[in-house]
Amino acid sequence: MERFVVRPSGPLSGQVEVFGAKNSVLKLMAATLLATGHHELENVPAITDVTIVRELLEAMGVASSYEGGGTSGRLRLDVPAGVVPVAPYELVEKIRASVVVMGPLLARYGSARMSLPGGDDFGGRPIDMHLRAFEEMGAVFTTEHGYVEGRCDRLVGGRIVFEFPSHTATDNVMMAAVLAKGTTVIENAAREPEVIDLAAMLTGMGARIEGAGTSRIEIEGVEELSPARHRAIADRVEAATFLGAVGLAGGEVELLHARAEHMEMLLEKLAAIGVHCVDTGRGILARASRPLRSVDVSTLPYPGVATDYKPVLVALLSVAEGVAIVSENIFAGRFRYVEELKRMGADIVTKGHHAVVRGVRRLSGAPVRSTDIRAGAALVLAGLVADGVTEVSGAAHIDRGYEDLAGRLRAIGADVRRESE
Ligand code: EPU
């Protein structure tokens, strides 16, 4: 096991490249199951979640190779005509997003067997919306020994109304619908940029999709798709992490490839806090002013402020002037890292899905534990404004979603390194 060791830093300066979006790439990888042949994905970061989904696809019979890293990361996937349509416990347990293989497997092979995902670091991760939608499209499920198994003849399109705009359920149903018989309409669909990215790749493979990025997606099923060649969009959560670093440590940094239009609400919140961002056409130029100011935050589905930004925002607010109320509306249990921030001197009270953050002048370095990808990154950032040394253990959590976070923060002037625990 490794940990991040962080010392007070700043001001930051220079440029940093934002890599491909994890929450897009994982779905793009699953989507390759929809067509036999050789697929090529670009802008695939070297992160553990990509490795785990590769292992998942390899267990099904898909051959893969990866070269480069960062924006040059290229993943080649060779999908055979027949795959083993099973997602085993050992892999699903590591990555709940594995559920996205279900749509492609049902659509293409009429069969999908998957370990039930269970809960994770921020609460239950049910898949009921996915299963209900597939049932409406003609799949029949049985659950036994911790596995859910779906079977169908060709899926049939229909009108799917989501009770909540679930990001991954939208991806999953979209992937199922592209090969279904007839037309599928998804109402109350998720509008995340990653949904648009997946739709773009599927369209490139021959799918007929309209409305991705809006609450109503219409998909006309086709008989067959061809292999994909697609470049993933930049990761807005990674961008948010670097913006948080600038806010905490101060300075001026350009985030190359970051897409301001994918993070409008966040940029508004950051401006109110004191992190000013300009769209440079090739990325975002961020400059922090002092003192940081408190602002209330409520997480919501896109285009609202994403739950994934929240740990970084809470880290900023913990040293901002004033009091902020932060409400979590997506994952009720996503406040665990707050206890770690409090160990660093943050003044935060949580009650249910709300937190009251009273800004303090400075944090104090301490050994803390990363509880999930974003929480871990936020603790590293908090270390930039903490007296003494902050040791963030559980680097593996951070590696799930960030390629070389320490090296890239160092390149813009932060004192962050890794060492063995
Ligand atoms: N939900 C259900 N039933 C379902 C599906 C979802 O009740 O069948 C609930 C969830 O429990 C949650 C809410 O709906 O309360 C939203 O979940 P959603 O399905 O939108 O989340 P997700 O698709 O599982 C993705 C990202 C998360 C990100 C959320 C919210 C991927 C692989 N993951 O999860 O990313 O937090 O959307 O934007 O795309 C991360 O990157 O660290 C991460 C956790």
Image: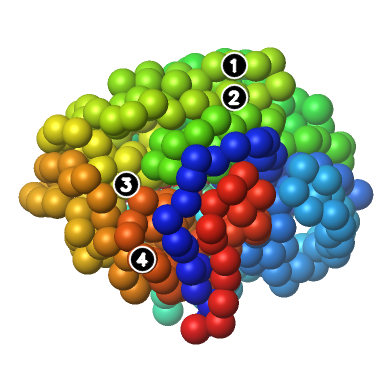
Q: Residue beneath label 4, please? A: 388
What type is the residue that disc 2 sits on?
A: Ile
Which element is circle 2 on? strand
How far is mark 4 from mark 3, CA to CA?
Answer: 17 Å
- Label disc, if present, on residue 315 of the rendered structure: 3
Q: Which of 254 and 177 is in front in this view?
A: 254
Can you give x and y, in whole percent of width and height, for residue 143 in the image?
41, 68
**Label located before the other in sequence (4 or 1):** 1
How far is mark 2 from mark 1, CA to CA?
Answer: 5 Å
- 279 to the left or right of 247: right
How far is mark 3 from mark 2, CA to CA?
Answer: 21 Å
Which of the colour schemes (rainbow, by chain, secondary structure, one colour) is used? Answer: rainbow
**Label located before the other in sequence (2 or 1):** 1
Q: Residue beneath label 1, please? A: 279
Q: Which one is in front in this view, the residue at disc 4 or the one at disc 3?
A: 4
**Label located before the other in sequence (3 or 2):** 2
